[in-house]
Image (spheres, rainbow, N blue to C red):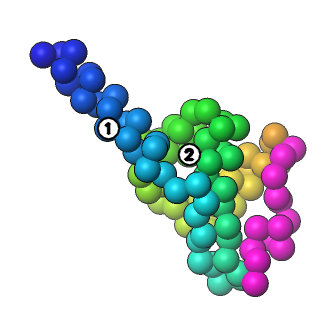
Amino acid sequence: MKRIIAAAALTLFTAGLALAADTITLPAKNGNITFNHKQHQETLKDCKICHEKGPGKIEGFGKDFAHKTCKGCHETKKQGPTKCGECHKK
């Protein structure tokens, strides 16, 4: 029974990854942000870096989260946009 539950959980998890959009456009006051989800999946490999509770929407996602987490990661890794106009496109 435990194996069936584990297999079902793994199937749901991988299905969520397969269904994730390659590119996501997020509306923002200062211009839309186009986020390459596929590139981040391939680079980071660990979904829990952003999705702490598993696949799906990021709980608490918004301006403060994005500026702290996303921009912070870009600064730490010295990769990706860190200036306003590099993310926000009008």
Q: Please, what secondary structure does the residue beneath circle 2 have?
A: loop
> In the image, which disc is placed on residue 12?
1
Observer able to see residue 59: no
Q: Residue at x 83, y 67 (%)?
A: 86
Relative horizontal placement of residue 85, taking residue 63 as reference (left or right): right
Q: Position of residue 84 (x, y in %)?
A: 81, 71
Q: Residue 42, relative to residue 57: is it above or below?
A: above
Highlighted range, magenta: 78-90
Q: Is residue 18 visible?
A: yes
Q: Is residue 48 above or below residue 30?
A: above
Residue at coordinates 43% horizontally, 50% vertically from top-left? 19
Mark drawn on residue 50: 2
Under mark 2, the amino acid is Cys
Local crowd size for mark 1, using a 10 Å CA cut-off: few (<14), some (14–19), many (≥20):
few
Q: Considering only order in the chain, which callout, 1 or 2, is on the residue closer to the N terminus? A: 1
Q: Quadrant of the N terminus?
A: top left
Tell me if 26 is positioned left or right of 87 in this view. left
Q: Is residue 83 above or below residue 19?
A: below
Residue 84, magenta (yes or no): yes
Image quarter of residue 87 = bottom right
Q: Residue at x 32, y 38 (%)?
A: 12
**Rendered residue at 59%/77% (across/down):** 27
Q: Quadrant of the C terminus?
A: bottom right
Q: Which mark is residue 22?
A: none
x and y percent of residue 64 in the render?
62, 64
